[in-house]
Amino acid sequence: MSETKKLSGSDARRAARNVSALVVASVISKGALFVWQLVLFAWLGAHDYGIYGTVGGLMVIAGSVTSFGMSLIVIRDVAREPDKAGGYWSAMVFWQTALALIAYVGINSFSVVYDEALRGFVALAGLNLFVDLFGNTGYDLLLAREEMLKTSLVEIAHILLRIGLAVLALVLGWGLLGIYGAAIASGLLRSLVLLALNWGDGLRPTFPIDRGISRPLLVNSLPLAASAFLTLAYQHTDKLMTTGILGVEGTGYLTVAFVINFGVIELFSTTVLVAAYPLLSRYHGEGKNPIFGFLIEKLTLYMVVIGLPLALFVSLLAPDAISSFFGEQNAVTAGILSILIWYTAITMIGNVFSKAMLIQNRQRLLLVFRALGLGLNIALNTILLTAWGDPRGAAVASVISESLVLILLFSSFAAAGFQWRRIANSVLRLLLIAGPVALLMIGMRGIHFLPALLTGLIAYILSMHIVRVFNSEDMDLLYRLVAALPGGSLVLRFWKRDIVLSW
């Protein structure tokens, strides 16, 4: 019996529902935020946007210290033992409040290497560490209980409110000060709503804090926290080092390219993996369930199928697209984006194995991989930014560093039900069509990048069908998941497969 048939109907429907809710929310909220970031770049200019990017990089790294990797532990454990949610809630708030203070002091101490204006914005933005921690704990508890619809609606409303307040602040002439004020105000409201949703469901933090939960949470989160810190550090080290070596204007060009890549990862990778994480945790069990490896294999294939054309299309069309949207004066961004998009594709694939190894309780090994990646990234940034005097050096450093991490992940991962041979077969078929599709797009882009993009996308999809990138089992699984999605019955009126649907 195939692993597809062993997957229970209730779990499949729940996973499909969760993915649907999070994907819709991501398309709306992350899409709105993505567009806003591009508008903000055009509104502020490269200099101020470089300040914004530098502060943002410090905030993301500080956020990893505050969260301390506890989210994944809490989601995993509460998904297995829902009755312990209150104990985890109080433990998270206690530890993360102390960690937020450490992070706030840390980013303000680090920012002394920059000018006074940038230091002031770091101090202001850092207040969000305390505001967001309450909302983030509430968000994690809802995810653990698979309340994806509630979290999705809150995130959409939060992003739209944040953008609206920021636009108002900019129109009033408050500049970056208004943007950070809007972030604090919208974050405070988000925290209140998420806490109220958990409270309304009857969930309460338990006091006194259960040491049987609190201590293991901190200890077990330490490798994850270190890994997240190292991951985010080398994701944002390029901006911090570019500001220090080349100045904030170079960071502005680099940041807008990073925003585009980050948006792609959030939409196509993070959303899917967050929704699938509780399901993967349950099926892993003691590590002998082949469905776990089977699902990791299919997620890997999904990321390859999405990541390869994204990297190919953007690297070929970025110069024309950036010129159309931002003008020839921002050609530097196009050069950065053409390189950095390959980092995105590599990261999307690596994220699957990172989550899988976390579920396997191999976070300490992940820590070693991330440390090696960060060390290489810092060394390459120092060499390339100094030698080239160009922010594209930071993009090259990121691609090489993430490639090293992916190779290490590949070499160390194993699970029952996971077969490299099946993935390799599909990847080879994809590579067969990548060359002809690239040549077609190169020939079309002289007309305009939009017809080239549309033609390339159609050719890619048709070629996948012709060379059979997906085998019959892949198609059966996809068919069953579509059937489980809200509105899937409408799709199945036109798409027919000889399968008896048990879910």
Image (cartoon, grey):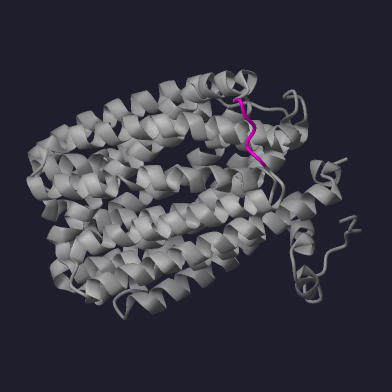
Dividing the picture into quadrants, the one containing residue 39 is bottom left
Q: Is residue 468 visible?
A: no
- x 47%, y 62%: residue: 158
Dividing the picture into quadrants, the one containing residue 123 is top left
Q: Main secondary structure of the magenta part?
A: loop
Query: Along the horizontal axis of the image, is 483 left or right of 199?
Result: right
Query: Along the horizontal axis of the image, is 110 left or right of 146?
Result: left
Q: Is residue 89 visible?
A: yes
Q: Residue 207: within the magenta?
A: yes
Placement of the C terminus among the 4 image quadrants: bottom right
Residue 150 image position (x, y, % from top left): 63, 59
Query: Along the horizontal axis of the image, is 428 left or right of 243?
Result: right
Residue 418 image position (x, y, % from top left): 68, 33
Residue 462 image position (x, y, % from top left): 59, 68
- x 49%, y 69%: residue: 457
Q: Nearer the viewer, residue 115 or 329?
A: 115
- x 37%, y 54%: residue: 261
- x 23%, y 42%: residue: 238
Placement of 498 over or under 304, stated as above or below: below
The total number of labels drawn is 0
Placement of 140 over or under 179, stated as above or below: above
Residue 56 image position (x, y, % from top left): 28, 49
Q: Nearer the viewer, residue 463 or 200?
A: 200
Placement of 419 over or under 458, stated as above or below: above
Dividing the picture into quadrants, the one containing residue 436 is bottom left
Placement of the N terminus among the 4 image quadrants: top right
Q: Residue 366: within the magenta?
A: no
What is the span of residues highlighted in magenta in the rendered image? 204-208
